[in-house]
Image: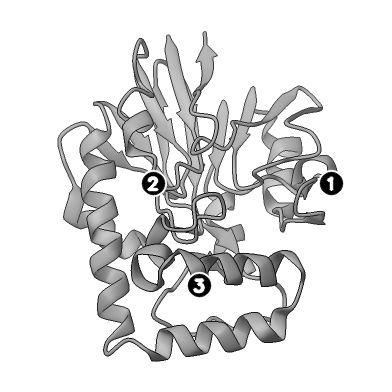
Amino acid sequence: MRVHVVSDVHGNAEALARAGDGADALVVLGDLIDFVDYHEHDGGILGALFGAENVATFARLRREGRRGEMVELSKRLWGSLDDPRAAVDEAVREQYTRLFAALPAPTYAIPGNVDAPALWPEFEAPGLHFVDGEVRDIGGLRFGFVGGAVLPEGATPRRDQAWRPYLRTREEFDKAVAGLTGVDVLGSHIPPAVPELTYDVVARRGELGSEALADLIVRERPRWSLFGHVHQPLSAAKRVGVTECRNVGHFQRDPRPYVLRW
């Protein structure tokens, strides 16, 4: 068997259409949507709605840690739209139309934090499997999947925002992980809570990993733990016990799938 695995596609539909070439199946570990394109400021949903100059300013404020000014800019930009939520949903659907059409069959996909899983049923197609929270047999191995990211401790999800990232409470996320028993391959969007795997060397901060995923790896001893989310990790791979933990890469910028063979 040969399975290709990608994550953090962020709108790169052209490369995604080739990601399954030569493989028996494709696995997508989330972040299909390009919301803020920090490399090409006229790209992504914010670029389409507000223009490259505003996105460049937003990116600079975020990079410099000027959160207050970034929040004020965001309020001003969103306030300039008559119906922000409708504008975002339309832009997301436009991206999903291209992205899901590019996927080969069979594909097994979970959403990342930069995804809108509530819209995914609109794009169901033969051979396209939405597997968040499920265990599936692929070529004789049991793959367990969990999507989204964990909501930071003490944070409260806002339902009135135009864009609602897929952030799950720790209790909800941990419950989904607990259901993944007897797995040979663990597929998630975020990494297990291992410092080398969660630290981003360009952003110079640690992303939030999952203790539940780390515990499952120790308990279930899968062959592989595969994930994305951290675009420039301190370490792309680390062995935890018998499990090879692997960041499969930032597919938008480096469109090469990670290859599993058995």
Query: Quick check: 99 left or right of 240?
Result: left
Which of the two labelled residues, at mark 2 and mark 3, occupies the earlier sequence position?
2
Hey, which residue is sitting farthest front in the picture?
53
In the depicted view, which residue is nearer to us: 226 or 138?
Answer: 226
For the residues labelled 2 and 3, the Cα–Cα distance comes to 20 Å
Q: Are marks 1 and 3 in contact (CB under 8 Å)?
A: no
| Amino acid identity at mark 2 | Gly
For the residues labelled 1 and 3, the Cα–Cα distance comes to 34 Å
Measured as percent of width and height from the top left, residue 197 is found at 76, 41
Instruction: Specify the label residue 54 is tagged with.
Output: 3
Mark 2 lies on residue: 11
Residue drawn at (52%, 17%), measured in percent from left and top? Answer: 259
Residue drawn at (30%, 28%), measured in percent from left and top? Answer: 17
Which of the two labelled residues, at mark 1 and mark 2, occupies the earlier sequence position?
2
Relative vertical location of residue 1 with respect to residue 89 in this rendering, above or below: above
For the residues labelled 1 and 2, the Cα–Cα distance comes to 28 Å
Q: Secondary structure at mark 2?
A: loop
Q: Dot 3: few (<14), some (14–19), or many (≥20) neighbours within 10 Å?
A: some
Q: Secondary structure at mark 3?
A: helix
Measured as percent of width and height from the top left, residue 79 is found at 41, 91
The mark closer to the camera, 1 or 3, is 3
Q: Secondary structure at mark 1?
A: helix
- Visible in this render: residue 232? yes
Q: Dot 2: few (<14), some (14–19), or many (≥20) neighbours within 10 Å?
A: many
The mark closer to the camera, 2 or 3, is 3
State which quadrant residue 91 falls in: bottom left
Mark 1 lies on residue: 195
Q: Dot 1: few (<14), some (14–19), or many (≥20) neighbours within 10 Å?
A: some
